[in-house]
Amino acid sequence: MSLLTVGTVAFDDIETPFGRAEKIVGGAATYIALAASYYTDQLKIVSVIGDDFPKEELDYMRSRGIDLEGLQVMRGEKSFFWAGRYHDNMNARDTLDTQLNVLAKFDPVLPASYKKSDYLMLGNLTPSIQKQVIDQLESKPKLIALDTMNFWMNTALDELMEVLKMIDVLIINDEEARQLSGQYSLVKAAAAIHKMGPKYLVIKKGEHGALLFEGEHIFFAPALPLAEVFDPTGAGDTFAGGFMGYIASTEDTSFENMKRAVIYGSAMASFCVEKFGIERLKGLTDDEITERITRFVRLVNFDAKL
Amino acid sequence: MSLLTVGTVAFDDIETPFGRAEKIVGGAATYIALAASYYTDQLKIVSVIGDDFPKEELDYMRSRGIDLEGLQVMRGEKSFFWAGRYHDNMNARDTLDTQLNVLAKFDPVLPASYKKSDYLMLGNLTPSIQKQVIDQLESKPKLIALDTMNFWMNTALDELMEVLKMIDVLIINDEEARQLSGQYSLVKAAAAIHKMGPKYLVIKKGEHGALLFEGEHIFFAPALPLAEVFDPTGAGDTFAGGFMGYIASTEDTSFENMKRAVIYGSAMASFCVEKFGIERLKGLTDDEITERITRFVRLVNFDAKL
């Protein structure tokens, strides 16, 4: 089934304790769509870039079955740009530069062929733009997931609360869940956020894994313990892409299947952090992905002997 | 099979965002033995207290099958005392006061009946005292586990390294594993620590769960997501007690059984944090424990459909 992704397609400068990469391809929609492309081939992107974006990168996305009809190219303009530097422990980072460029004028327009998408993944963007996309759909998707961040909680909380009423799955990190709910306990935070609209909540905890909540039901997936974390950029978006890609491919929104989707998303994220940017997400094989899922099974599997 | 526990039996003053408790019973050996008492009744403690320690608390320990022959009582002396205050997020705490009292002169002497214990849990203490206990044993236990802390890494590293060569399981938290190994990645930290002696390593991550390492094998157990964490004091010791108590009761040191022991230890720790001190560890029922283990199974169980 088709998965529509909305989010940035951009350039990043990244500095980690292991090295530095300049003007590499990034952006939420890029990571989401690439990760999802390993599970489903009916992928559509709504985004905006300048004419500085390399054609070969767009060709690569198309080669992975990603439909770019909804990707606007603004002539004479520059693509969105972000620069960041990670701290030694890789758990924190500083933003060094943000240049909105084309994003400042972004007015998402859905091509006719996008308006009946089965699944929708709204990457982190202005809540009003996320809502504009939902408003253009001709039929309600089977599942709408949304990512956001504390910046929008601080600057556009009313718009965010409005769009939260329209979605099914909220995917945010632990700090964001605490800020949005005003609760430190993630169990209490989940209960508060359910009341804002989303039936499902995924709380990403980085190296500490991810939690899936549906009412009283809780599922926990660890992150794979890795010897090397090279670059965490995009890991959260890659998780979301694997999660929604798996659900779209299986057409099953039961809690049991969402648990699997959390594991499949975590597996994609575990690849993402092994190299700079999207590098490791290119050319993965089915065997590599299966091996990674098997590692998750072994990591948490036990016989309780009750 | 018998489990010998060495560690403090003490008083604590505890301040959390939820309240304050003064001069309540604490100490590593207390938590370890109480938690273990739900799995095995052949429990022995080596420790030291002053004559200020309440008789009814000792009677309660005896009623749970804990042999106190090795618990020295120093006449006219005070028991070890610790006071601490937790930060709002409960993940960090400040030590407000430490009074060694009887601990300053502690010279552990094993009663004859203790010298052939099958399992040994060395709670956090001066490494030289931990070694003194091992040296007094007449036969090698089936499994020796040891807890320690960064204070001993800073002040008695040589003695600590010596005792690490004599043990099977090291149980420490993530910060301590990083300090001991000089590695940030816990996978690399585990590899470095294996070389120091312990075949098994348990890394406790508090609210983020625990990892068990044996060579290339890794098992992860989450902490139960709880709505209320009232007082984290003793949670690590309670985990260790449940872990070793379960292993002693099953007489099985296979990796498969140690995985279960990690879950059973985590279940005991999830009770511990619900009330002040040892309060919640008193009078648990089999049904309560089984229900807690079942929650762990549900929390992590998924069908990968590979």
Image (cartoon, coloured by chain):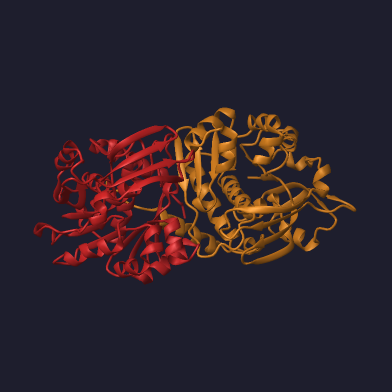
Chain colours: A red, B orange
Number of marks in picture? 0
Q: Quadrant of the C terminus of chain B?
A: top left
Residue name at image x 18 percent, y 48 percent: A40
Task: Please state the horizontal and vertical placement of residue A72, each as a whole percent of the image.
Answer: 16, 51
Task: Please state the horizontal and vertical placement of residue A70, each as a whole percent of the image.
Answer: 15, 53
The outermost residue toward the front is A76
**On screen, residue B166 above or below B86:** above
Residue name at image x 16 percent, y 65 percent: A136
Q: Hey, which quadrant is residue B93 in on the image?
A: bottom right
Q: Is residue A231 left or right of residue B279?
A: left
Residue name at image x 59 percent, y 42 percent: B172
User: Residue B159, can we see it?
Assistant: yes
Q: Nearer the viewer, residue A108 or B106?
A: A108
Task: Please state the horizontal and vertical placement of residue A79, each as a whole percent of the image.
Answer: 24, 46
Residue name at image x 30 percent, y 47 percent: A238
The outermost residue toward the right is B76
Q: Hey, which quadrant is residue B83 in on the image?
A: bottom right
**On screen, residue B50 above or below A61:** below
The outermost residue toward the bottom is A195
User: Residue B148, can we see it?
Assistant: no
Q: Is residue A48 left or right of residue B292?
A: left
Q: Hey, which quadrant is residue A232 in on the image?
A: top left
Q: Quadrant of the N terminus of chain B?
A: top right
Q: Is residue A279 left or right of residue B45?
A: left
Q: Is residue B302 left or right of residue B23?
A: left
